[in-house]
Amino acid sequence: MNIAQWLQARALLTPDAPALFSGSELKADYRQFAAQASGLAESLQRDYGIQQGDRIALYMPNRIELLVLMYAVWWAGAVVVPINYKLHAKEAAWIAENAQASLLFSDQGQSMSEVGMPEGCMELGVDTSTVRAMLECKKMLIAPAALAPHTLAWLFYTSGTTGRPKGVMLTHDNLVAMSLCYTVDVDNVSIDDAILYAAPMSHGAGLYNFVFVRLGARHVVPESRGFDSVEILDLGKRLGGLSMFAAPTMVKRLISVAKAAGSDGEGIKSIVCGGAPMYAADFVEALDVFGPKFMQIYGQGESPMTITAMRREIIADRAHPQWHKRLASVGIPQACIEVRIVNDTLCDVPTGTHGEVLVRGITVMQGYWRNSEATQDTLVDGWLRTGDIGFLDEAGFLTLTDRSKDVIISGGSNIYPREVEEVLLRHPHVFEAAVVGSPHADWGEEVVAFVVASSGAQLDGAVLEAWCKAEMASFKKPKRYLFCPELPKNSYGKVLKTVLREKAREPV
Ligand code: AMP
C-alpha cells in the first residue's frame, strides 16, 4: 500500500473539487494537487536520483506546498522526515543527519547556511525558481510507486525532552490504520468539510490530512501559517465546515478570543483536542462558548493520534452521571488499539488502579530508526510502553494522570499532578496551573503549584490553600504556590515541567 494512492484515486474521482487553500484563497483543485505531487515525484527521481526508501526532510512552517511535498515524496516511494520548523537549524541538521536524508526542503533553501548541511544531504527551497518549476506540472505523469507491505512512510523525531530525539518509524499501513480510526472513533468527514492546519503540520495536524484527501475535502493553511484566533474565527465564517486539531492551550486561546468577540465559532465544525492534558474545567468553558464541537484524542508519536478518543456526543452529554469524570478522561481505546494498565513489573493491575499505559495495535510504530536499544526498551512483547500513567474505569474510559517521570512521591505516597491541577483549574480565578515535585529533606518531594491567574483577578496562596483544603486529601495539597504570568511551553503547546522543576528548586 502507498498512501499516495488515496490522492491519485481522489483526483480521478473528483478532479475539479477544491483541494488546497491559502487562507480563503483557492490554490489548487484535486487534479492540480495530484499533478503537482506526481510531477515533483518524477523530478525527484530523475533530477535528484531519489529512490524508494530514501529519506527527504521537510523543514518549514505550515504552507500548502508542504502537502504537495509530502505526497510527492510518497509518490516516489520515499520517506518523509518532518522537522518542526521551530527547531534550531543545528537540531534540524542533527535530525537530517541521523535520518541520512538525501534532500531537505525549506522555504528559501538557506536554512542550513549558518550550520552547514550534513554530508550527502542537499537543501532545496520551495520559494526558489527550481522548485517552483518542479511544481508546475499540469497532469499526473506517473503512478505512485508500488510498495511492499510495511514500507516506511513517516520518520518522525520525538521532541526529545529526555536526551536526543529518536526517529519513530511509521509505515504506510500505520498511516492508513490511523486515518481509518479517525472516521470511526473521532468524527465523520465529507467532501463539504475543510481541514485547517493551524497546529504544526510536522506533527499530528499534518497526519490528519489523509482522511480528508480520501474523502475529497478542502485543506486550508491560514495565511499566518500558524495559530491566530481571530484569523481562525474569520476563516470559519468564510469557508464553513472547518475541522482542526488543536493543543489544549490553543483551544483556550481561541475560546477566550471568541468569548470576548461574542462569537460562537460559526463555520467551525470540529475541534480535536490532544497532545497535552485538556482539563475538565476548560472543556466546560469551551462547550459553553462553542457548543458541541469538541473531541479529544490521546496519542503519541509512537502511535500517532490513535490511542484513545472521546467523541463529541460524550463530551457534550451534560446529563450523564459520569460526565465530569469523563471530561477529565481521554476516552476509550480507538478501534485498532488495545490498552493495558500495568505495574512496575509489567503485570496487569485491577480496574481503577494507576499504572503505566501499554498499547498494542496496527498504528503502533515499527521501532526507532537505528536505535535498537531504545526500541527494545519501548516495544516489549509487542506492547508499546507509553511512559504515561493512568487508570481505566469500568466502562473502559482511560484517565491519564501523568507522564511516569512527573509523578510526585511525597512521604511515600504517589501524587498525580493532574489531579491537583484539575482542582486548581476549577477555581474561577485560575487561568492555568501546573504542578511539579521539588526535592524536600523530610518528605522526599513536596508539591509545588505554578499558577497563572485569570486576567485582572487577585489571587494569593492563602485563597488557593483554602480552596484545595476543601477539595482534596491533605497530603496532595501544594505546599507552595508560585504565581507567574504564563507557563513555559514547547512549540506543540506542552507545558515544560522540567523547566518548572528547576524553577521550583530556586531559593525563595
Ligand atoms: P508526542 O509524542 O510529542 O505526541 O507526545 C505524546 C505525549 O503527549 C503522550 O505520551 C502524553 O503524555 C501527552 N498527551 C497526548 N495526548 C494527550 C491528551 N489528550 N491528554 C493528556 N496528555 C496527552
Image (cartoon, helix red, strand yellow):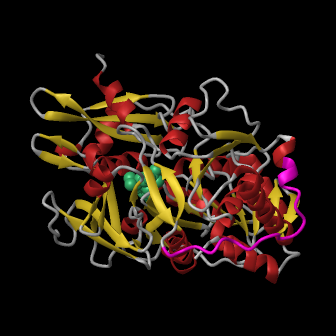
Q: Which image quadrant: the N terminus? A: bottom right
Report the number of numbered marks.
Answer: 0
Magenta highlight range:
132-149
| Ligand 1 quadrant assignment | bottom left
Looking at this view, is 143 or 473 the one in front? 143
Coordinates of residue 265 in the picture (x, y in percent): 71, 60
Instruction: Please tell me which residue lies in front, 435 or 91.
Output: 91
Q: Is residue 136 magenta?
A: yes
Q: Is residue 416 visible?
A: yes
| 165 sits left or right of 346 in the view | right
Image quarter in which the C terminus is found: top left
Q: Is residue 376 magenta?
A: no
Q: What residue sits 32% from the left and 31% below the top?
A: 501
State which quadrant residue 270 falls in. Answer: bottom right
Mostly what secondary structure, the magenta segment? loop
Residue at position x 27%, y 44% from top?
405
370 w.r.t. 361: above or below: above
Residue at horizontal 46 percent and vertical 41 percent from the top: 432
Q: Position of residue 276 (x, y in %)?
A: 45, 52
| 41 in relation to 147, above or below | above
Q: What residue occupies the far top of the structure in this picture?
A: 507
On the image, the x and y values in percent for residue 340 come to: 26, 70
Q: Nearer the viewer, residue 125 or 485?
A: 125
Q: Is any part of residue 245 visible from this angle?
A: no
Choose top left, top right, bottom left or bottom right for residue 368: bottom left
Residue 113 or 23: which is nearer the viewer?
113
Q: Along the horizontal axis of the image, is 224 left or right of 317? A: right
Residue 437, picture quadrant? top left
- Residue 495 is situated, as x and y percent measured from the top left of the image, at 44, 41
